[in-house]
Image: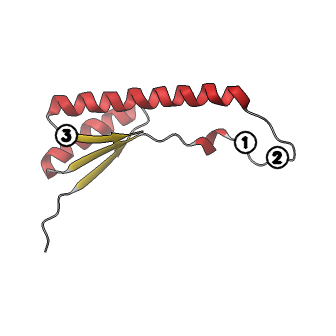
Amino acid sequence: MTDTVPKLLIATDGSDYSQNAILQGLELAILMDANVYILYVIDKKAYVPPILKTSIPLGSKWDIMEETLRQEGNEAIQYAKKVAEDKGVDIEACC
């Protein structure tokens, strides 16, 4: 049997529920002595209408929405980093 370090992935969307998941996940990581990875993903497909006979250009409206989602993701990751730092847990985070 090889000595491996457990890995724990915590996904966040910035909601109260995901903030609770971060808290619980970090506590679990401490117990497991696990490497922690925190992730925020923007699912662009969720904001694109199904294939239609005529195209609907999203143009600058999509750019505004995407920037808003990126900002929310950054805030969610910053929250996770702060909580991890307070608990003395090293994490890797990506959005």
Q: Which residue is mark 1?
A: 49
Left or right: residue 27 compared with residue 62 = left
Left or right: residue 85 compared with residue 13 = left
Q: For the point 52% across and 39% down, which residue is it?
A: 42
Q: Residues within 10 Å of mark 2 (few under 14, many from 20)?
A: few
Note whether residue 77 is visible. yes
Note whether residue 15 is visible. no
Give residue 24's quadrant in the image: top left
Left or right: residue 33 compared with residue 47 = left
What element does badge 3 sit on?
Answer: loop
Q: For the point 14% across and 50% down, which residue is it?
A: 33
Q: Amino acid at mark 1?
A: Pro
Q: Amino acid at mark 3?
A: Asp
Of marks 1 and 3, the one in the foreground:
3
Marks 2 and 1, how far apart in space? 8 Å
Q: Which residue is mark 3?
A: 90
Q: Earlier in the sequence, mark 2 or mark 3?
A: 2
Q: Which residue is mark 2?
A: 52
Marks 2 and 3, how far apart in space? 46 Å
Q: Amino acid at mark 2?
A: Leu
Marks 1 and 3, how far apart in space? 39 Å
Give residue 86's quadrant in the image: top left
What element does badge 2 sit on?
Answer: loop
Q: Nearer the viewer, residue 58 or 47?
A: 58
Q: For the point 12% across and 66% down, which residue is it?
A: 3
